[in-house]
Amino acid sequence: MHYARHLAAGAHPVARALRRRGREVWPLRRRGADLGYAVPVHRRPPDLRQALARWQRSEAVFLPGMLGDGPARHGEAIAASLRMFDRLRRGGSFLDELDRRLRDDADLRYAGSTADRNDRREIERVFVDAMPGGERVASDLWAKLTWIADDASDRSLRIRFSAGLEQLEEWMQATDLTAGWVDQFAARAFPEGAAILGCEPLRRLLQALLDRPHRLSERIVYNNAPDGGAVFHHDAEPGQLGVVFSQLEGRTGWLAIGKRRLAALLAPDGSARARRQAMAALDRGDDQALWRRLNRDAAFAGLLAAHGALFVLQAGDVILLPSQGIDDVAWHSVTALGRRPSLAHSYGLFPRRDDYPVAADPWSR
C-alpha cells in the first residue's frame, strides 16, 4: 500500500506537469539536502485488521483524517501557538509566553527557569510545581524550548514537557502521578491538544492496538520550519510503547519504516549476515556513510518510498510509531513541507498504573 510516490531530485518538469493537473507535489528538502519530491497517492485509512498487522510488525500506522474536524474546532488555539512560535523564533521570552498562558491557573506555580549553555540547541527551560489546593503534589515539572537541529539554517523549534533531572533520565522512573501532572502542564499550556485528547476514534484504535490502560505522556509540541525537520532516528525508550504524532496545521513529509525492513534495504547483498551488520550499524550511530545515505541520499529516499515508507501528513492526520524494543521499532525522519512553519503534537505511549490522576485527564476518562 503506497500513500505517496517519490519523484527524483531534479524532476522539475514532471513536478510542474503534475501541479498543472491539480496534483500536490512537495519538495523534500532538509537543511540543504535535496531528497526529491513527494506526491500523495491516496488517503485511505487502514481498517483495524490492517492497523493491527502493521503495529505488530513495528511499522508506522498512517491515519489520514483521524482527528476529523478537531483542528478546525481548535483553530483559534492553533493560530495562537503559531504566532507564539514566530515570536520565540525572533527572540521572545519563553517564560513570558507560558506566563500569559498559565497566569490564571491555580494549580501550577512557577518554580524557576534556566538555560543550559552547554547545549547549543537549548533556548530556555521553565519549571513549575503542581500545587492543587496549595499542597505540592509534584515538583520539578518542566517545559524546554529548543531548536530541533544544531544547525543555524534550520529554524524549527520544539517544546518538550517532562520532569526531573534530564541527564539522569529521571522521567523514566517518575510516578504516574508526576507524569500525570506533566501531562496537565502540557495540556493547559497548549489547549489545542484537546483535538487529540478528545478524539474518540483514536482512543478506540489505541485501546485495540495496546489492549491495556495507557497514558499519553512526554508530550512535545513541534513547529517545523521550511527546510527543516528531524533526521532518521527511533524512539525505543525503556517502558515506552510507541508514539502518537498528530499534525494540527501545515504539512510534514515522513520516511518511516520498521528497523528490520530498513536494515534489509541497507544490506548490500540481502544476506542474513549483511542484515545483522546493518542492524548493528544503525545501533552504533557512528557510520558517517550510513548517516549520509539515510539523510542526504535522494536515491535511497526513493527506494524507501518504493517500499511504502513515504507519507505526507496534513492537518488532521495522525501517524503511530510502534516501539516494542530496540530491534522492533519504527525508524523515521521528518521533513517540513510548504513555505510556513507547521504545528504538531507528539505524545509518547506508556502503560498506565493506578496512581495516574485519571480524573484530570480527558484521554484517560
Image (spheres, helix red, strand yellow):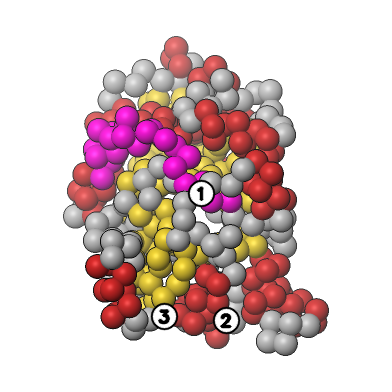
**201 sits left or right of 350 in the view:** left
Could you give the CA–CA distance between mark 3 and mark 1, rounded to whole angstroms? 25 Å
**Quarter in which the C terminus is drawn:** top right
Q: Earlier in the sequence, mark 3 or mark 1?
A: 3
**Quarter in which the N terminus is drawn:** bottom right
| Range drawn in magenta | 61-82
Q: Which mark is residue 8?
A: 3
Identified by mark 3, the residue type is Ala
- The one nearer the camera, 194 or 180, is 194
Q: Is residue 323 visible?
A: no
Q: Earlier in the sequence, mark 2 or mark 3?
A: 3
Q: Residue at x 44, y 42 (%)?
A: 65
Q: Is residue 279 above or below residue 241?
A: below
Q: Residues within 10 Å of mark 3 (few under 14, many from 20)?
A: some
Identified by mark 2, the residue type is Leu
What SS does tag 3 mark? loop
78 inside magenta stretch: yes
Q: Nearer the viewer, mark 2 or mark 3?
A: 3
Q: Residue at x 21, y 44 (%)?
A: 83
Question: Which residue in the structure is indicated by mark 1?
Answer: 44
Q: Is residue 72 visible?
A: yes
Q: Is residue 47 above or below residue 133?
A: below
Q: Residues within 10 Å of mark 2 (few under 14, many from 20)?
A: some
- The one nearer the camera, 196 or 96, is 196
Q: Nearer the viewer, mark 2 or mark 1?
A: 1
Looking at this rendering, what residue extends furthest in the right direction? 272
Q: Which mark is residue 290?
A: 2
276 inside magenta stretch: no
What SS does tag 1 mark? loop
- The one nearer the camera, 162 or 307, is 307
Identified by mark 1, the residue type is Arg
